Amino acid sequence: MAKRFLTNLSLVLLTAILTMSCSTEETASEISAAAAIASPTPTPVVTNQNGLTTIVVNLAPTEGEGQTGTATFVSDGSTTTVEIEVKPPAAEAQPIHVHTGVCTDVGTVRHALQNIVKGMSVTIIDQSIAEITEGGALVNVHASYTESSNYTACGQLPDSLTN
């Protein structure tokens, strides 16, 4: 009887261990998949859904050390909301703009965005994303007002708004 009890107990414990290890592996793969989806990409991601065009642009240092993050543009066709998130956050407010050109050859300012404070900025522009990106555009983060020629991150907006 004791032998049968130990056998049954062993089977129950083995089943519990296998169940836990399977769910742990499943959770790990789910976490890995979610992380891959959330990771910024080197090229902008454009989606068109429910009448909204969304562009997610990877921000990266133009040279050496700087900041990384994302610029997310969401447009309903007449206005565009721009959300910026950068890391590490700077100690002081950072100017940020949409410029003409490319990150290696920054042109004139098209739109001044709300300063980045504590790593974040939100701005609403009264233009469609098509108008903002026409002719080539980029997002440029400056180190500070006193170091405005020091760019800490840049991200190129796409030439095309199709997926």
Image (cartoon, rainbow, N blue to C red):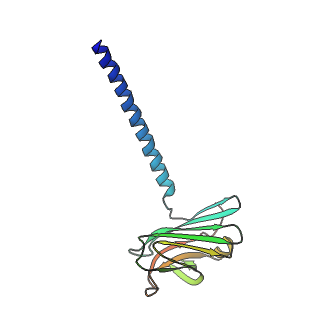
User: Residue 104: x, y in percent?
Assistant: 50, 78
Compared across the picture, whether 69 is left or right of 113 comes to: left
User: Residue 145: x, y in percent?
Assistant: 46, 86
User: Residue 12: x, y in percent?
Assistant: 37, 25
- Front residue of 124/99: it is 124
Residue in the picture at 46% in, 72% down: 119
The quarter holding residue 51 reads bottom right
Q: Quadrant of the N terminus?
A: top left
Residue in the picture at 45% in, 73% down: 118
User: Residue 131: x, y in percent?
Assistant: 68, 75
> Farthest residue toward the left?
2
The number of numbered badges drawn on the structure is 0
The quarter holding residue 47 reads bottom right
The quarter holding residue 114 reads bottom right
> Farthest residue toward the top?
1
Residue in the picture at 59% in, 71% down: 82
Q: Quadrant of the C terminus?
A: bottom right
Compared across the picture, whether 143 is left or right of 161 comes to: left
| Above-or-below relation of 27 to 48 | above
